[in-house]
Amino acid sequence: MLTGKTALVTGSTSGIGLGIAKALARQGANIVLNGFGDVEGPKAEIAKLGAKVGYHGADMSKPAEIEDMMKSAAAQFGRVDILVNNAGIQHVARIEDFPPERWDAIIAINLSSAFHATRLALPAMKAANWGRIINVASVHGLVASAEKSAYVAAKHGIVGLTKVTALENATSGITCNAICPGWVLTPLVQKQVDAKAAALGVSNEEAKKVLLGEKEPSMQFTTPEELGELAVFFCSPAANNVRGVAWNMDGGWAAQ
Ligand code: NAD
């Protein structure tokens, strides 16, 4: 379905971003990966699916590096047709204890980076009259939790940015939608499981149950594979008129 299209997924060396990149690769898209840590492993996983794969190591907190990434993706593949703004970090602390530099980093990586990548992707999408922008928000784009001020602010912000992007392009072939996962067992969440296990003096498995039990009625983690399939739907012709939604996949979290 996506043969000949190019998808750039930020923060795709791990977790949800890699799951989405793999799902889009299975549909035939060329993939541009981004993120830190092991790069060769994720590149090999995408190549095994038969997709052409590129990589750019832009730090998503740095607008000049984002600009370089968008330019080099276009130089390598002609155009970015599908932009998945996924890179994100977390920090957990009450507001009075929240380090201001962590606030700035979370707003830059989880929110401002999506603005920069979107503004740089739109001209080529407009010229082609086709584009898909998928913002990986969170259930924290819809509801709040204590001790996550920067994350919740950034995720509510990205849901707002999603709606504006969708509206500004509503009469074109460019759509923009957000995905709002509940708990997904990635390195970002494993850190919170570890903290819970240490705080309560319980096992890793017990801590996972406590974490799920606090928020997620299904008592199940959403998987990167399931989120990848939602991204594929947003890229399909059936989703041509899905514009500006914030679609939660959260085991009933936000339904409470
Ligand atoms: P993860 O830690 O597994 O992956 C994060 C990715 O972002 C990695 O590839 C990392 O290298 C990259 N990254 C981090 N800082 C970066 C920077 N400055 N520049 C470029 N890349 C950077 O986390 P994840 O759980 O897969 O999270 C991905 C997205 O999903 C985030 O936006 C997160 O907020 C969101 N999300 C996660 C969950 C969850 O439960 N895991 C739930 C809702 C939303």
Image (cartoon, rainbow, N blue to C red):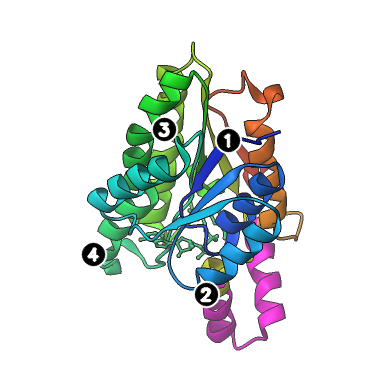
Question: What residue is pinned by disc 3?
Answer: 160
- Please tell me whether mark 1 sits on a helix, a strand or a loop: loop
Question: What residue is pinned by disc 2?
Answer: 191
Front-most of 9 and 108?
A: 9
Front-most of 57 and 155?
A: 57
Please say whether residue 212 is one of the residues in the magenta stretch: yes
Amino acid type at circle 2 is Lys
Alpha carbon distance from label 2 to label 1: 35 Å
| Mark 4 neighbour density, 10 Å: few (under 14) some (14–19) many (20 or more) | few
Residue pictured at 41% horizontal, 67% vertical: 92
* Rendering coords of residue 187 (x, y %): 55, 70
Alpha carbon distance from label 1 to label 4: 38 Å
Front-most of 87 and 154?
A: 87
- Please identify the dominant SS of the magenta region: helix
| Magenta span | 191-215
Question: Counting residues from the N terminus, which is met first, the one under dot 2 or under dot 1?
Answer: 1
Amino acid type at circle 1 is Lys
Question: What residue is pinned by disc 1?
Answer: 5
Question: Counting residues from the N terminus, which is met first, the one under dot 3 or under dot 4?
Answer: 4
Residue pictured at 43% horizontal, 63% vertical: 90
Front-most of 117 and 88?
A: 117
Alpha carbon distance from label 3 to label 4: 23 Å
Please say whether residue 78 is one of the residues in the magenta stretch: no
- The N terminus lies in which quarter of the figure? top right
- Numbered disc in front, either 1 or 4: 1
Amino acid type at circle 3 is Gly
Amino acid type at circle 4 is Glu
Alpha carbon distance from label 3 to label 2: 28 Å
